[in-house]
């Protein structure tokens, strides 16, 4: 009897080793409540020097990006630190399954020149027992973090079918000092919080910076001689200019998808209307002409429409009009005050700030106003902005009281994975850059 | 006689403010309610904001028909600083507003009348009216609302005979509150316009901005 038992057990074990290959791991990020996939990222192979200088950074960047996306959860390195990993051999799938891993990323580094590092990496699907992706890249040693982001984007893209968003930067307003005399300055950083750089000093109030789609510029509003004015900042030349001398305040600037038109608001005589300026010719066109407040304009990604906020009907609501100012339609109809509409780069949704019953909510709706969903709610949330793949929204959140202040948060389109973006100081008005490059070529 | 006067001023203000805010229905409701004048509780659609006792410090007890500044002696100031000081210490340099509103309270109209008399007595000085909003709103809308408020004050001054070229309008939106707590007692004070004497190097906190050329 015991022998029979043993034989059956042995047969079962043998059968286990010859299980047919499972379907490849895939992540659907449109559904809520995604169960994060356990992922292991190994320290890339290479000389001790390379591992110390670059390997650690790559590990931190790749692991950090993927886990912060909410789609993955990391395994403690200590669990597999003892494992011998050979880049050119397939891993011992059974053992990695035993660790609870679904995805394993391995790599190796080689010195190419003084300035350049060769990085090869593989992405293994432990369940399906096969390689999902293998690439070789050449990276600039002076910006290894960027190589890490590109790799993380490639992994994200391979597993979700969606474009990644890790190779991007965020511009925002750093705030210091007491609430009634805030010192503000423009700051730019990688989306993971690294490589922070000041773009201005704090001698003027600064608000609402936005990236140009062509990446060369940022537009923002600064109060010079008490008057709010729209400015442009050239990222390469590090120069600032105002777009024009108006005898009224100008604010709420955004770029059209072609990068050469700016849309903004002018407030004069108690009326605020929307205008565009051709940045090449500097010609200005008026799009709305109302006895009300019309502001916070945002283009659709195809450049054909503009969503904006208006109180022409009595209280702030969201409207959509053609890019030439015609065919204005209201799209928000539920109870509450709606503002700061921002069109997703995917074109399918418009994010907004809503005030309702004393609370501030960030939500999304379709461009026809249907399908309203709230992503977060609280004392004060404001100013949503989209990741370039239209999957993540960052916004800022204020805490109440004299000692309170703003901080930047991110949340998925699904409403899950709400996280604080670490800036080290009070921070507000975040804006996401487009992807810094095309990304790595994956099939 | 008192009633006639009151109705006349109300009607005048009604027409005036209706022209500014572009929403007659809302204005009508607000202006007819005496309680609103004194800054007491008012419902604003979905955003219920109470304004309990947060009206003007000095002037909360005045009744309409009474112009607190009607009998003060307007001085001819010898400097921008003393001009500023005079307006501020006498309390007619500013006015407050209800949530989302740019309508002038009765007492604010009186303050602006005093400003108009001051400007007549001091032709060498011009003014900048700064509009402000409380933190309960979005950046862009609050900038626009601040401008609307400052502009309402400006138009009232112009109606009093002040040369429009002497009055500049700017807005700080929610950027420069005077009170920092997060409840109505502070918010009501932040919803304001403030009239300042225009100086040559008018900058916000910085020293001397010269027009549009600046370095970072």
Image (spheres, coloured by chain):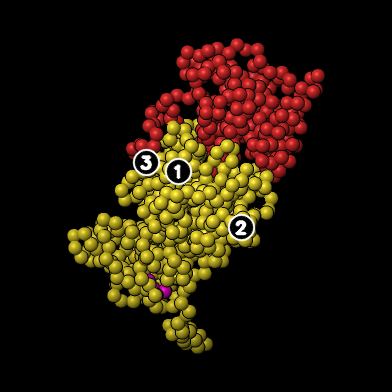
CB-based contact (under 8 Å), mark 2 and mark 3: no
Judging depth in this view, the residue of A366 and A261 nearest the camera is A261
Mark 3: which secondary structure? loop
Q: Quickly name the residue at label 3.
A: A200
Please tell me which of labels 3 and 1 falls first in the chain.
Answer: 3
Tell me, yes or no, if residue B15 can be seen here. Answer: yes
The residues colored magenta run A122-126
Mark 1 and mark 2: span between their CA atoms? Answer: 27 Å
Residue in the picture at 40% in, 30% down: B206
Identify the mark at residue B175; answer none if there is no mark: none
Mark 3 vs mark 1: give the one in front: 1
Relative vertical location of residue A344 with respect to residue A397 in this rendering, above or below: below
Q: Quickly name the residue at label 1.
A: A230
| Chain yellow in the figure, letter | A
Is B175 left or right of A333, judged from the image as shown? left
Q: Quickly name the residue at label 2.
A: A327
| Rendering coords of residue A27 (x, y %) | 49, 70
Identify the chain of the residue marked 2, using the numbered disc in the image: A
**Does residue B155 belong to the magenta stretch?**
no
Judging depth in this view, the residue of B161 and A275 nearest the camera is B161
Mark 2 and mark 3: span between their CA atoms? Answer: 39 Å
Identify the chain of the residue marked 1, using the numbered disc in the image: A
| Chain red in the figure, letter | B
Mark 3 and mark 1: span between their CA atoms? Answer: 14 Å
Residue in the picture at 21% in, 59% down: A115
**Does residue A124 belong to the magenta stretch?**
yes
Relative vertical location of residue B182 with respect to residue B196 in this rendering, above or below: below
Please tell me which of labels 2 and 3 falls first in the chain.
Answer: 3
Tell me, yes or no, if residue B177 can be seen here. Answer: no
Mark 2 vs mark 3: give the one in front: 2
């Amino acid at each position: 009897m015991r022998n029979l038992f043993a034989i059956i057990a042995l047969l079962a074990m043998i059968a286990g080793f010859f299980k047919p290959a499972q379907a490849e791991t895939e992540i659907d990020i449109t559904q809520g409540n995604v169960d994060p996939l356990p992922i292991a990222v190994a320290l890339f192979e290479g000389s001790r020097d390379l591992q110390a200088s670059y390997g650690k950074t790559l590990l931190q960047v790749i692991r950090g990006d993927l886990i912060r996306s909410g789609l993955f959860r990391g395994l403690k390195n200590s669990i597999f630190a003892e494992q011998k990993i050979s880049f050119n051999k397939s891993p011992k799938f059974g053992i990695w399954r035993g660790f609870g891993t679904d995805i394993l990323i391995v790599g190796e580094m080689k010195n190419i020149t003084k300035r350049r590092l060769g990085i090869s990496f593989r992405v293994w699907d432990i369940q399906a027992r096969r390689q999902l992706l293998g690439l070789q890249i050449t990276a600039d040693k002076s910006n290894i973090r960027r190589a890490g982001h590109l790799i993380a984007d490639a992994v994200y893209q391979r597993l979700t079918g969606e474009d990644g968003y890790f190779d991007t930067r965020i511009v925002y307003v750093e705030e210091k000092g007491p609430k009634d005399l805030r010192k503000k300055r423009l700051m730019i950083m990688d989306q993971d919080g690294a490589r922070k750089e000041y773009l201005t000093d704090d001698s003027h109030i600064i608000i609402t910076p936005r990236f140009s789609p062509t990446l060369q510029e940022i537009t923002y509003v600064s109060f010079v001689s008490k008057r709010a004015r729209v400015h442009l900042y050239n990222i390469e030349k590090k120069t600032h200019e105002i777009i024009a001398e108006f005898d009224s305040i100008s604010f709420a600037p955004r770029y059209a998808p072609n990068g050469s038109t700016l849309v903004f608001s002018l407030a004069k005589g108690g009326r605020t209307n929307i205008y565009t300026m051709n940045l090449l010719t500097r010609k200005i066109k008026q799009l709305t002409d109302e006895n009300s407040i019309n502001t916070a304009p945002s283009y659709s990604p195809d450049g054909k429409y503009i969503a904006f906020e208006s109180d022409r009907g009595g209280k702030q609501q969201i409207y959509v009009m053609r890019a030439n100012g015609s065919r204005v339609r209201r799209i928000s109809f539920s109870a509450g005050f709606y503002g700061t509409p921002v069109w997703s780069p995917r074109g399918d949704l418009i994010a907004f700030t809503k005030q309702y019953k004393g609370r501030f909510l960030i939500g999304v709706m379709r461009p026809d106003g249907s399908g309203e969903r709230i992503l977060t709610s609280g004392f004060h949330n404001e100013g949503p902005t989209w990741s370039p793949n239209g999957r993540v929204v960052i916004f800022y959140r204020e805490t109440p009281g004299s000692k309170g202040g703003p901080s930047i948060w991110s949340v998925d389109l699904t409403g899950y994975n709400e996280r604080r973006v670490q800036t080290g100081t009070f921070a507000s008005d975040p804006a996401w850059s487009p992807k810094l490059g095309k990304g790595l070529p994956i099939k | 006689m008192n009633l006639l006067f009151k109705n006349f001023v109300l009607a005048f203000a009604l027409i005036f403010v209706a022209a500014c805010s572009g929403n007659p229905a809302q204005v009508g409701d607000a202006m007819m309610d005496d309680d609103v004048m004194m800054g007491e509780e008012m419902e604003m659609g979905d955003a219920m904001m109470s304004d309990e006792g947060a009206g003007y410090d000095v002037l909360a007890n005045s009744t309409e028909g009474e112009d607190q500044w009607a009998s003060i002696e307007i001085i001819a100031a010898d400097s921008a600083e003393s001009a500023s000081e005079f307006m501020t210490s006498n309390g007619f340099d500013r006015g407050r507003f209800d949530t989302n509103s740019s309508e002038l309270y009765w007492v604010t109209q009186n303050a602006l009348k005093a400003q108009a008399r001051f400007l007549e007595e001091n032709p060498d000085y011009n003014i900048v009216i700064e509009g402000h909003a409380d933190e309960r709103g979005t950046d862009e809308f609050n900038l626009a609302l601040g401008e609307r408020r400052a502009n309402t004050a400006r138009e009232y001054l112009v109606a009093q005979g002040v040369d429009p070229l002497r009055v500049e309008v700017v807005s700080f939106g929610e950027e420069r509150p005077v009170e920092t707590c997060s409840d109505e007692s502070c918010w009501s004070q932040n919803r304001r316009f403030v009239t300042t004497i225009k100086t040559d190097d008018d900058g916000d906190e910085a020293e001397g901005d010269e027009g549009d050329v600046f370095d970072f």
